[in-house]
Image (spheres, grey):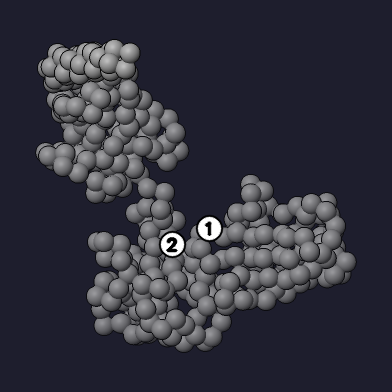
Amino acid sequence: MKNIVKSVFILFGALAVSCSVDDVQDRPVIEGVDSPVLSAPESGSSYVLSPATMAQQAERFVWSKANYNGDVAISYALEIDVEGGDFSAPQSLGGTTGALQLSVSQETLNTACLALGATPYTAASFDVRVVSSASGFDLMGSNKVTITVTPFTTDLPQIAVPGNHQGWSPSTAPRLAASGFGQTDYEGYVALDGEFKFVGPNGSGAYEWGNDDWGDDGTFSGMLALTGESNCTATAGYYKINANTATLAYTTTLTTWGVLGSATAPVTGGDGWGTDANMTYNSTTKKWSIVINLVGGQEIKFRANDAWGLNYGDNGADASLEEGGSNIAVPSTGDYLVELDLSNPRAYTYTLTPQ
């Protein structure tokens, strides 16, 4: 009986080995036969991208099915490179499994073009292709289509303000920001302490000595010079700084900050709009703050130097401040930690934290 059982196991083992070898021998080698063909868009297509419409479709890319000598799942990757590039380091625009088209948003196309070195708001040409793969076998690239893209940026141009207040290090200095790309009207808030200068970024975006730097033209009348300049000067304090590297005019406005409004009336007296509750500056957090009792359903604003010449409100009720903006509603009565953050140029914010 033992011999019969042993013989059966030997027989099945031989059959298994025989089938396994035959399967391997009969299995076709997966090879690419016909590459996909990118049919849309056409070469010469042009795209002007915008931050206002970045969620919208920039283009629907369409291609033909790749042909492999087997019934296999086919994946597609859409790639973009600079015009004439060899796609050794392309940017991805996305991919599909089986599908022969892909909708690409303006944001995705914009990000890829900037990563390839495009200059915002300047048209540049790029090559796009589709690469197919069958279960990881045989990558095949399509034809290349050349398109023209004008990308955008939501980053505002900046200049650094190194000086006595931070050890004269441009790379770690506080910044001023322009109102838009290509603009030269820089603004921001800096705690100064004596002499300072303005330093622009180099081509790599680094702030360092040897770049363009501006100082006072020597008259100390609010005019800058790029060469032969003197260090600008200011007594210790917290300043709103405006500097225009085209007109070469600059101003430094010494500020202290307070909060006022109908919500502060029990603390400041009257209707609350005549007297500020003074805030204190923290050089570590770079914020102005005060703990104060506020009346719910009433309003506040922030202003400098106990005057209305420079004040901030919130137009969108989103904790983002605008100069001369709308009054800020206080949700409920109670003590609040009120913080004013002017450290991010042209992106000023505030918080009301119940205590």
Q: Amino acid at mark 2?
A: Ala
Q: Residue at x 34, y 54 (%)?
A: 182
**Type of amino acid under label 1:** Ala
Dot 1: few (<14), some (14–19), or many (≥20) neighbours within 10 Å?
few
Q: Is residue 180 rendered to the left or right of residue 302?
A: left
Tags 2 and 1 touching, CB below 8 Å: yes
Mark 2 is surrounded, within 10 Å at the Cα level, by few (under 14), some (14 to 19) or many (20 or more) other residues, namely: many
Q: Residue at x 47, y 83 (%)?
A: 165
Q: In the image, residue 6 lies at what x, y percent?
A: 28, 18
Along the viewing direction, whichever of 303 and 109 lies nearer the viewer: 109
How far across and down, in percent of the image, does residue 242 sit?
46, 68
* Label placed on residue 347: 1
Earlier-in-chain disc, 2 versus 1:
2
In the image, residue 30 lies at what x, y percent? 16, 20
Secondary element at image label 1: loop
Q: Nearer the viewer, residue 255 or 166?
A: 166
Q: Look at mark 2 in the image and give the residue it sits on.
A: 177
Q: Point out which mark residue 102 bears.
A: none
* Residue 226 can be seen in this image: no
- Residue 225 sits in quarter: bottom left
Q: Secondary structure at mark 2?
A: strand
* Image position of 74 (left or right of 349): left
Q: Is residue 205 visible?
A: yes
Name which residue lies at 56% across and 66% down: 342
Would you say 141 lies left or right of 260 here? left
Residue under the point 33% across and 75% down: 214
When the figure is inspected, residue 44 is found, relative to residue 171, above or below; the finding is: above
Quarter in which the N terminus is drawn: top left
Front residue of 79/140: it is: 140
Q: Return the x and y of residue 129 as percentages of the image width and height.
A: 20, 29
